[in-house]
Every structure is written in C-alpha cells, then in structure tokens.
Image (cartoon, helix red, strand yellow):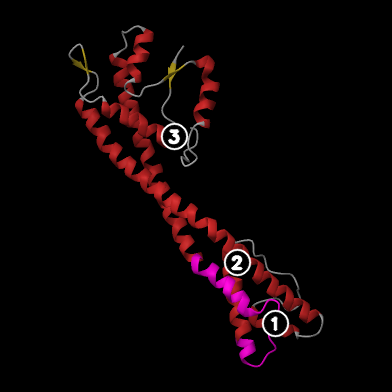
C-alpha cells in the first residue's frame, strides 16, 4: 500500500513548497485543487525559508573556506608553542636555566609536562603567555631560548592569533544561521502537511494510479512500503552534504 511522508531535509522541503506554489490557481473540472490562501501562505513562507537557507549556506561556505588555511596556521602555532616549552624544560633539566624562571610563564615549576594544547583556546592562551614572559625575561638580561627563538614562535603564533577570533565569529554566524533554519522547520512541515492533505482529499475518489500521478504535480510523493528502505537509502545518498537536517 503506497504511503506518503513529509520531506526530511531542508532541500526537499523547499522543493515541496515550490511545487505547490507553481500550481497556484490550478483547477480540475473548474474546481481549485488548492485554495488561494494556502498557496499565498506557502509562497510567503517559501521566500522566508529560502532566505534563511541561503544565509546559512553563505555562512557555512565562508567558515569552511577559511578553515582550510586556518587549520594549517593552528597546527604550526601549536607545534612552535609546544616545541618552545619542551626546549625550555630541557634547558632546566640540564641545569642551564633555573626552575623558578617558569613561574612568569604560568608553567608548574616541578613538572616538565607540556600543557594540553589540544584546543584552539589553549594554543591561543599559552602562546600569549610564553611570548610575553620570554620577551620580558630577555629584556631584563635573561639568556634567550633558541631553536626555536621566541621571535619564530611569535611569527607563527601571530598568524594563527590574527585569525583565531575571526574564526570564532564565523562559527557563531554559521551556528546562528543554522538555528534560524531549524526554528522554521516545524512551520514548513505544517504548511506542507496542510497542502498535501488538501491535495490528497481532492483526489480521494480518483483511481489510485491516477491519484498518485496527479499528486506528484503538487510535490506529494507516495512510497511503496515494500521498497521503502531501498528508496530511502537512494534518496539520502543523493542529498548534498550541505543539508544538515537529520532523518526524523
């Protein structure tokens, strides 16, 4: 027995709304299949939903494109910050530097473990600390640490740091845009359900095969239960990766 299901991705929601709007004013035997009020509501909402989806797409692309270079900058900054701390620890262990010089850097005096630099925030924080502390120490006559020098660390950390706060803004903009789309989904589903109910009821007395064909013009798709799994997998595999809506 064929059955119908609401669209499960944003792109399919937009497609369903577009199909209904395109059929505005369509009559069968002189009778409107969809009321003008319904198509007007669908048209107005479609514009709002498409704008929200387009905004999310732009924010996603901007964040994704910036990530390509940003990840390399983050990796280099992490490497240099970690290496500098390791070199300092080895110099202390060899007796070339005193333990207490680690205090201004915020590093534990009796531990030679490198701080956890897994997160971007940690790289930003520790890089800022060691650069300030090393520059202040050498200005007072302290022997500079080499290989890498703090100048080299500062170059790579500075490149990363320049983009660090920008990346946070990109991520926040993307999340906000996605939230706006998410908040519109229930309304989209309600409008589509109303459209499909009207269309389904209008063609209720038609022969099954003819009814299914007529309903297609309005974006209403029927599925064969025995082929449900195969068709669902085929549709899902053809969806663009940008559509993050999960199966309901």
Horizontal side of residue 62 vs 36, given as left or right: right
Q: Which residue is mark 3?
A: 9
- Say if mark 1 contacts mark 2, CB within 8 Å: no
Residue 108 locus on image (x, y percent): 71, 76
Residue 83 locus on image (x, y percent): 70, 71
Tell me, for residue 15, which label it has, or none: none
Give the secondary structure at mark 3. loop
Q: CA distance from mark 1 to mark 2?
A: 22 Å
Which callout, 1 or 3, points to the residue nearer the camera?
1
Disc 2 packing (10 Å; few <14; some 14–19; many ≥20): some
Residue 7 locus on image (x, y percent): 42, 29
Q: Residue at x 66, y 79 (%)?
A: 149
**Farthest bottom residue?**
141
Residue 106 position by quadrant: bottom right
Q: Which residue is mark 2?
A: 122
Q: Kindly tell me whether residue 164 is visible in this rendering.
A: yes
Give the secondary structure at mark 1. loop
Horizontal side of residue 164 vs 27, given as left or right: right
Q: What is the count of numbered marks?
A: 3
Q: Residue at x 17, y 13 (%)?
A: 30
Upstream in sequence: badge 1 or badge 2: 2
Residue 70 locus on image (x, y percent): 54, 60
Horizontal side of residue 212 vs 29, given as left or right: right
Write the start and end of the magenta stretch as one range.
136-163
Residue 248 highlighted magenta (yes or no): no
Upstream in sequence: badge 2 or badge 3: 3
Q: Which residue is mark 1?
A: 145
Q: Residue at x 48, y 65 (%)?
A: 165
Disc 3 packing (10 Å; few <14; some 14–19; many ≥20): some
């Amino acid at each position: 027995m064929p059955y119908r299901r609401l669209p499960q991705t944003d792109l399919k929601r937009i497609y369903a709304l577009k199909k209904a709007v395109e059929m505005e004013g369509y009559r069968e035997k002189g009778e409107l299949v969809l009321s003008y009020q319904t198509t007007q509501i669908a048209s107005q909402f479609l514009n709002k939903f498409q704008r929200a989806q387009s905004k999310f797409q732009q924010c996603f692309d901007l964040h994704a494109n910036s990530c390509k270079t940003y990840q390399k900058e983050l990796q280099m900054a992490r490497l240099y910050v970690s290496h500098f701390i390791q070199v300092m620890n080895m110099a202390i262990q060899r007796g070339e530097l005193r333990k207490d010089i680690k205090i201004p850097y915020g590093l534990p005096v009796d531990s030679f473990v490198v701080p956890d630099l897994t997160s971007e925030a940690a790289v930003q924080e520790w890089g800022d600390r060691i650069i300030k502390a090393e520059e202040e120490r050498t200005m007072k006559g302290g022997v500079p640490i080499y290989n890498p020098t703090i100048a080299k660390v500062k170059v790579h950390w500075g490149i990363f740091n320049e983009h660090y706060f920008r990346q946070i803004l990109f991520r926040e903009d993307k999340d906000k845009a996605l939230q706006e789309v998410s908040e519109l989904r229930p309304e989209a589903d309600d409008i589509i359900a109303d459209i499909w109910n009207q269309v389904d009821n209008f063609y209720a007395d038609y022969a099954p095969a003819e009814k299914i064909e007529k309903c297609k013009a309005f974006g209403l798709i029927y599925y064969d239960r025995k082929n449900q799994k195969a068709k669902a997998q085929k549709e899902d595999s053809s969806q663009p990766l940008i559509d993050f809506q999960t199966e309901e």
